[in-house]
Amino acid sequence: MSKHLISHFKSIKQISESEQATSIRFCDFTNQNRFSYLLGLTQHSRLTALSFVEVVDIGISPDPDILLPAALDWMKEKIRNLDLKGFSLEHSDFLSDVSYRPSLCLHRIDAKFRFSTSGLDGDCVISLSFPEFSAGQKKDSEIELRIKQISFDNTGRSIDKNDAKETILKELESEKIETFKTLSIPASGAVAP
């Protein structure tokens, strides 16, 4: 799908012929760096239009190639995928205990944000996920960013939700790429996640 869109935009001169798309895949990170990446885009975001509120949903899987810490031994051979929904999950052991990170595959994080953009204020839940990994353990799954919920403080105004979503996602897109550059595995030294 993205290759088709890139070709289309090049054909109508929206983007340069030499422009290369940056593909951010699950396998581009170690387990630890994937935690840092997803948490960096949520609770440690540097965006001015978005203020992190809390993590409300996560998807994790034990890495079958890495020994689980003793505290997570209960997951061994019993849990393939674990979805947690709640409030302030950034304080849960799964996200806060760094000793768990080498043995867990964090493949989705949904975070609630407060936003203020283009004169619009409100709350939104943004999902950052590797959907093909979640569905079938495909390590070449590309990251997907989407706004799951959005609400506005001033409902009396004529508000175009799509414009607000587009503005938020554009800002997040640039931070997504910059953060990726610092945490991805170098192509020459690829290591299994």
Image (cartoon, rainbow, N blue to C red):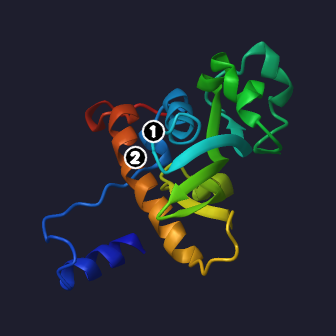
Which residue position holds label 2? 175
- The answer to whether residue 129 of the structure is visible from this angle is no
> Dot 1 lies on which element?
loop
Which residue position holds label 1? 46
Q: Is residue 6 left or right of residue 135?
A: left
Of the residues under marks 1 and 2, which one precedes in the sequence?
1
Residue 11 in picture, x, y percent from top left: 19, 84
Look at the picture and state if 18 lies above or below 71: below
Residue 104 in picture, x, y percent from top left: 65, 31
What is the crowding at mark 1: few (fewer than 14 residues within 10 Å), some, or many (at least 20)? some
- Which quadrant is home to the N terminus? bottom left
> Dot 2 lies on which element?
helix
* Residue pictured at 22% horizontal, 77% vertical: 14
Given contact means CB atoms under 8 Å apart, are the residues at marks 1 and 2 in contact? Answer: yes
Camera-side residue of 140 and 163 = 163
- The answer to whether residue 3 of the structure is visible from this angle is yes
Residue 49 in picture, x, y percent from top left: 49, 51
Look at the picture and state if 184 lies above or below 102: below
What is the crowding at mark 2: few (fewer than 14 residues within 10 Å), some, or many (at least 20)? some
Identify the amino acid type marked 1.
Arg
Identify the amino acid type marked 2.
Glu
